[in-house]
Image (cartoon, rainbow, N blue to C red):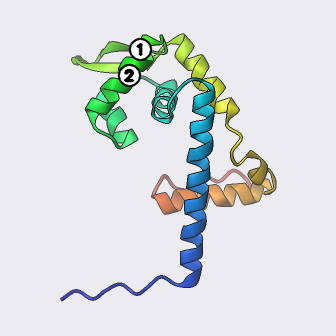
Amino acid sequence: MPSRPAPADPLTLEVVELIGSVVARYHQEYDEAAARHSLTGAQARLLSLLHHRPLPMREIARRLKCEPSNVTGIVDRLESRGLVERRPDPADRRVKLAAATDEGHETARRLRASLDFAREPLAELTPVERAVLRDLLKRMLGVERPETDGD
């Protein structure tokens, strides 16, 4: 019979609680910013993804952690507003890419600029502290090796 993991120490529990609070605050502000642009949170997240580059519908679903059929509905609504368009993938014409239109890119840019979350709290940290926080978060998430930028 496998042994049970040891209970988390108080510091770990406090860190997990703080991370949860940061995530909840981020989602609340993100949804409020989205609403100011007449978008749902899901529409805003999808548009923000497409601001970087066109993506296949399945990749969007994977990144948003939802079913492809949900992505279809979100893309339909954004497409009806002129923010997103579907286009064939040049590498595989059977695959449809969702791509932000010029208006979609502008909306995504304005949305990002309107997010105030963490600007003030992060401004309280020195550039070195922000770099350490970034590197620790990347390490926790298993994302690329921390960057060295001379700090």
Task: Report which residue position mark 1 lands on.
Answer: 79
Residue type, numbered disc 1 = Glu
Residue neighbourhood size for the residue with mark 1, other residues' Cα within 10 Å, grouped as few (<14), some (14–19), many (≥20): some
Residue 73 placed where, x, y %? 33, 25
| Residue of label 2 | 75
CB under 8 Å between callouts 1 and 2? Answer: yes
Q: Could you classify mark 2 by the number of other residues whose Cα lies within 10 Å: few (under 14), some (14-19), or many (20 or more)? A: many
Say which amino acid is labelled 2.
Val
Q: Residue at x 60, y 60 (%)?
A: 21
- Residue at left offset 43%, top offset 85%: 7
Asked if residue 46 can be seen in this view, the reply is yes
Residue 142 vs residue 33, the one in the foreground: 33
- Badge 1 marks a residue whose secondary structure is helix
Measured in 3D between alpha carbons, the distance from the residue under mark 1 to the one under mark 2, in whole angstroms, is 6 Å
Q: Quadrant of residue 79?
A: top left
Residue located 58% across and 71% down the image = 15
Query: Percent from the top left, x then y, of residue 14?
Result: 59, 74
Q: Is residue 70 left or right of residue 123?
A: left
Residue 111 location, x and y as percent? 62, 28
Numbered badge on residue 9: none
Left or right: 94, with 113 as reference point: left
Q: Quadrant of the N terminus?
A: bottom left
Image point (59%, 39%), residue name: 30
